[in-house]
Image (cartoon, rainbow, N blue to C red):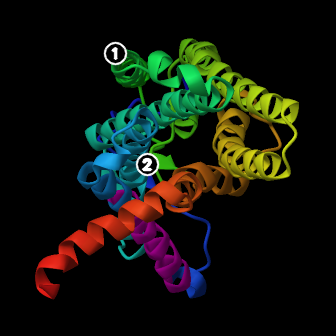
Amino acid sequence: MTGRNQTIVSEFLLLGLPIQSEHQNLFYVLFLAMYVTTILGNLLILVLICLDPHLHTPMYLFLSNLSFSDLCFSSVTMPKLLKNMQSQDPSIPYAGCLTQTYFFLFFGDLESFLLVAMAYDRYVAICFPLHYTAIMSPRLCLFLLVLSWVLTTFHAMLHTLLMASLHFCEDNVIAHFFCDMSALLKLSCSDTRVNELVIFITGGLILVIPFLLIITSYARIVSSTLKVPSARGIRKAFSTCGSHLTVVSLFYGTIIGLYLCPSANNSTVKETVMAMMYTVVTPMLNPFIYSLRNRDMKGALRRVFWRKKTPFSL
């Protein structure tokens, strides 16, 4: 630390993705298409849930919040990435970097808690169908949502304030496409042990415990389904649980691997690719996995568009 320049950093430079210049436009179109798909898919879900009374149930209440979270989570990083891919100025102000870090953590944490709530909702619906309405009461649903938003607010604020307390020296080049915490810690010329300890402890609470709760919920669902032998029921349960667990594993696996179990062998390229999986791919897949494939959403789609076409057909 003594050998490094103590100049106060007013902005950072985002290196972006390790893409060769001749492939830049191709990847730009690809990421733009993925981002537009994410926005349209999640907006469609929000509109359908708002307009169709049949979807005003606990399951779709959580889904609407997940769609909003996915939409915002992707929007925290993707617009800046797309802009930088077409710009010669990859800079981001210091305050803008901290703001991006805060909202990245906020919507990432919110998605984690919402996935737990959704897994619990499915567990109650399949394992205790006769008591579903009593258990998943409006009061419990509201409590779960408020708790999720409050916990994510405090967690994101904690890490942002700890990051703001660090000093950054002459080196202001972030080897990433957004203001990632681990990349920022590598640039700091302060003692980052407290930050790293808090990441490890809170990460266990925010990521590992929810992940285990989700796995436990789906394991109980499968176990409950197997107790009542039915080829159709078993096929439906494994189809639903398999697709959901694929996205859950993709989301949690990459985050836990990056932040809680970092490896000295992890290259910048590998870390960037892993980050793309949970910041870009997962928010894009969630609308298809959780909503647009199921019968209720397809029915809502027909009802909403039919209702809008009816006046013209009269």
State the image coordinates of residue 176 (x, y, percent, origin top left). 54, 52
State the image coordinates of residue 236 (x, y, percent, origin top left). 73, 51
> 112 or 123: which is nearer to us?
123
State the image coordinates of residue 152 (x, y, percent, origin top left). 41, 23
Quarter placement of the N terminus: top right
Q: CA distance from mark 1 to mark 2?
A: 24 Å
Quarter placement of the C terminus: bottom left
Say if 141 sits above or below 243 in the image. Answer: above
Earlier sequence position, callout 1 versus callout 2: 2
* Residue 285 counted in the magenta span: no
Check whether the beta carbons of the residues at disc 1 and disc 2 lie within 8 A of each other.
no
Residue 100's quadrant in the figure?
top left
Answer left or right for 71 relative to 180: left
State the image coordinates of residue 85 (x, y, percent, origin top left). 43, 72
In the image, what residue type sits under mark 1?
Answer: Arg
Say if 169 sits above or below 135 in the image. Answer: below
- In the image, what residue occupies the spot 67% across and 29% down? 214
Identify the residue under disc 2: 70
> 139 or 93: which is nearer to us?
139
- In the image, what residue occupies the spot 59% across and 31% down? 125
Secondary structure mostly seen in magenta is: helix
- In the image, what residue occupies the spot 62% across and 13% down? 201
Residue 125 at least partly seen: yes
Identify the residue under disc 1: 139
In the image, what residue type sits under mark 2?
Answer: Asp
- Residue range corresponding to the magenta coloring: 25-43
Instruction: Give the crowd class for mark 2: few <14, some 14-19, many >=20 residues within 10 Å.
Output: many
